[in-house]
Image (cartoon, coloured by chain):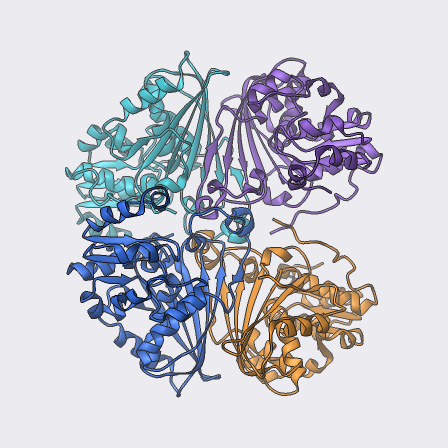
Chain colours: A cyan, B purple, C blue, D orange
């Protein structure tokens, strides 16, 4: 177990050797830092929780992350590890790029629609996050006196999770899809709520959508299709995803909401889920935890 | 000053007489209750803070509010009082339907775009509200143990503020516009944040949008066009509206965010602003208050 | 598993028979309700989470709870179940009165001092609680719009947990002790923090206090003596108690702070801990859970 | 108007000259910084919001603040500016040491009792504060992810506001009084709540206390004696102080709670109140603001 501080203080080569002696490595570094280390790690399995190996296209990475991708030749070794959608691929892989928190919720919310080609035109996602998604480093924007009783959007049209969502949805559909993604910082600590709004490609009603979602996720332990408006607190502290599809028949639109705990299914929980798949363990090993409510 | 309890306990006719003796009446009753009282009030000026006289079309009202509109013949006497957009009309009116909280933020955020015919297709609005918008009556959904660390959407595709927004935008444009509106309840007390996302009818950049908004609202004391991501706390306790237009050039879309205090510009503050217009007083009388920050 | 609603709707005698068929009964009813039911329950073990069987003196109960104790003859069968302080007694008992949330934190914080006769004069306890301690029933006082950004004291000099604390401390010391207890409602959901302030009977320093506390609780899995200022979030969702003793040498006073999760060690968790003792199971069965942080 | 950054970047002598040209100077610097500047300021009136000139005894200052007081010879020029208790003295002074937030609430809560010699023995104060009292500089302890759902005590037996309270109470009584003061950080932004608990010197009841407090503060616009448990939100954004005295007749103790907004009556508001007194203006000039509720 190494902290980010270690990496800055100690000889990098020494650390790489030490880490390589582990069977499974979980890496959680800021953008651009994993790039410098993971290509040299010899461990059998690596799960990277950062964004450095998620995007397949070096140019897309560089455009959204704002710096050069120095290990682009490694990208093809990595599997985008949204467990429910890439289980078989993960099982055959040695290097897993663990999805971002917003993409986890967004892609799972939209996958059944995309797979069924039920969406036409751009998808609008309003994503709401607690503050733990922004990490531990103190800053004015995370000072409690600023955050309480406040909500604001951020990185409009520029959030680096946008291409990650588009890449995953395009892979499901076999053609490009475009996402207008807006993130918002809420006065709470844990939890992500996404509201995905899109034009329906053809007529459908709520019962059909419910059936589609139930069928699509019928074998998934961590995904629950619900018939109410799911709140983030329902899944707090757990690896669960609650998804609710709605139809606006007046407008011919579909609205899907989904909630996760950004620190569990949106980060460490899914990393463990992926490690379980890599190691051939039951997928819910160490993840059998109910939400903490209230 | 009468409380809602009074109305239930006392003789309605007596109350109506008493209220009629006031010069200006502010009415803040649940949906359907103002209907039974306001048509009989003889006061010179009435400002109704509820939804009963906002929609011009009785059928639309009945569809979204779920009950009969028993005073439809009165509707033409009422002016929809979004102060900045209907100042002259308000000044000539005696009956003002004060806008809802979500519509106030949404319409002001979108008016310059609609006026300029810059929007094509449906508009998606993700609206985020503190709990004071839901009123004072205790309920499980407003119990602090449920609300803290939680966010969820509600009334998806069914929120009664949707036709109010569509009606106002259609009036500006001269043709119908459709709005996919989703409200969310946040763990905070005051404040509304709207994120309006739409397809641009033609190419534009952020500087052009900023100019358009500055020009459109150049004489408005309570509206401030900003170049950052406005947060609800910036306007808490004040009658101000902060609006930020953005362009997503990659997608050819426009995203506008806006914040108000739902209890001030979204309710009582705008009611006073309207009364000031009715009475020929300076429009900011009694409203010269800065936000309470932090 | 019966809900309180059941008790009001169904025949009481029928319910009593049904409940009596269980081996272990956990009862969580409002004050005065358990009185009417538990004396007739024939189950081997009963753990009552309410206040009806905690006080040994019927008159004290009636004074603080404000109604008659109709089953006073039962009181001697019940053991006050603060697990760490009454383990042997609990193991021999069939009826456990699970302690209140404030008393659990307060008594554990003070027990080593009282046992050592280190306190002279009245003890002042400032107790701070999240809202979940007040239960689920919606009320104005628990409406999120009132609770956020607010803190206030309540039931000053009248809180029914006061005699419970005094009874437990008197039992340890063998003579009466008096407690001035003030509870406060905080804008958070879970957690109790107590600050106990008292005059030291003789000179002591912090190192001595730390040693005394470490020794007193040396075999306790759920109690951790800490050397910082413990916060409620450190124990959220867990059965742990963090206690920090301090000395104010200038004043010759001792200040002890302690934190618990009111819904776990302060209620359901301790009930399970007690059931584990009753059943001869390892005391931490089903309670091996770390705090959810952040 | 100078910022703290200015002071570090620019020539101090130049700044001192510039500031000296103002008629009234408000100074709000960290401990130890005002010491270096204010003795050289030639302005007619200075109100210092920091702690450097509050304590009359250089040694006490050095003991609690942990550094040398380099301008001890200036101390006698300064008046401790708790407006309600030192109005005449302030009016004759040129240099005002504005009280700390905790002392403002605590001293006002206790003054009537101390003046009446109703207290015997040590006074215990449990003080609860929102985060804005800790200032704007980001730190781990003020990161929203740590603060929400948490409460903890801090600086037990070491808080520098302790001698400030003792000094003020001793001045009222004419002899020393000792205070055991514990501060707590709450998950909210504004507001201080103090619970003062002490032994009554003689029998008294609640009605007598209410009368004593009403009489003592009968001419005070900003002080309201209440008969409920006052909450911090009642005074948020205002210069008001709500005080509630209670008697615990069983124990012969008195408990007084009081609430203020730490940024108004506890800081900037009282500074303005004092400037109004200095300048011979009506004391509530610019302070006529109600609380922002909810």
Q: Is residue A155 visible?
A: no
Position of A144 relative to B37 (above/below): below
Residue B88 percent across, percent down from the top left = 80, 25
Q: Which of A166 and B222 is in front in this view?
A: B222
Q: Nearer the viewer, residue A35 or B228?
A: B228
Position of C166 relative to C50 (above/below): below
Left or right relative to C94: residue A113? right
Residue C81 percent across, percent down from the top left = 28, 65
Q: Which of D254 and D50 is in front in this view?
A: D254
Q: How many labels does the image show?
A: 0
Position of A103 relative to C230 (above/below): above
Residue A174 percent across, percent down from the top left = 32, 17
Corner quadrant of residue D240: bottom right
Corner quadrant of residue C272: bottom left
Q: Can residue B6 be seen in this view?
A: yes
Residue C162 percent across, percent down from the top left = 43, 69
Corner quadrant of residue B287: top right
Left or right relative to B153: residue A56? left
Q: In which quarter of the image is the N terminus of chain B?
A: top right
Q: Nearer the viewer, residue B16 or D281?
A: B16
Q: Which residue is drawn at 76% across and 57% down?
A: D286
């Amino acid at each position: 177990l190494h902290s980010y501080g270690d990496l800055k203080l100690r000889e990098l080569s020494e650390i790489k050797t030490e880490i390589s002696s582990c069977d499974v490595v979980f890496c959680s570094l800021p953008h651009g830092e994993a790039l410098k280390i993971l290509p040299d790690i010899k461990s059998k399995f690596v799960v990277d929780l950062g964004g450095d190996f998620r995007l397949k296209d070096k140019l897309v990475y560089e455009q959204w992350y704002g710096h050069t991708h120095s290990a682009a030749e490694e990208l093809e070794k990595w599997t985008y590890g949204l467990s429910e959608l890439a289980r078989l691929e993960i099982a055959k892989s040695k290097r897993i790029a663990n999805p971002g928190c917003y993409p986890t919720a967004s892609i799972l919310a939209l996958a059944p629609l995309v797979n069924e080609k039920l969406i036409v035109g751009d998808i609008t996602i309003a994503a709401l996050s607690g503050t733990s998604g922004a990490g531990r480093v103190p800053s004015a924007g995370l000072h409690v006196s600023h955050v309480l009783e406040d909500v604001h959007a951020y990185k409009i049209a520029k959030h680096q999770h946008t291409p990650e969502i588009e890449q995953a949805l395009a892979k499901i559909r076999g053609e490009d899809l475009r996402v207008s993604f807006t993130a918002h910082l809420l006065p709470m600590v844990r939890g992500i709520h996404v509201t995905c709004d899109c034009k329906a490609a053809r007529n459908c009603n709520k019962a059909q959508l419910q059936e589609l979602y139930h069928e699509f996720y019928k074998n998934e332990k961590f995904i629950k299709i619900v018939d109410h408006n799911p709140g983030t607190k329902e899944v707090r502290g757990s690896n669960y995803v609650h998804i609710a599809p709605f139809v606006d028949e007046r407008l011919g639109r579909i609205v899907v909401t989904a909630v996760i705990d950004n620190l569990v299914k949106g980060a460490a929980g899914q990393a463990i889920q992926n490690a379980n798949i890599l190691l051939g363990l039951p997928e819910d090993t160490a993840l059998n935890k109910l939400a903490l409510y209230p």
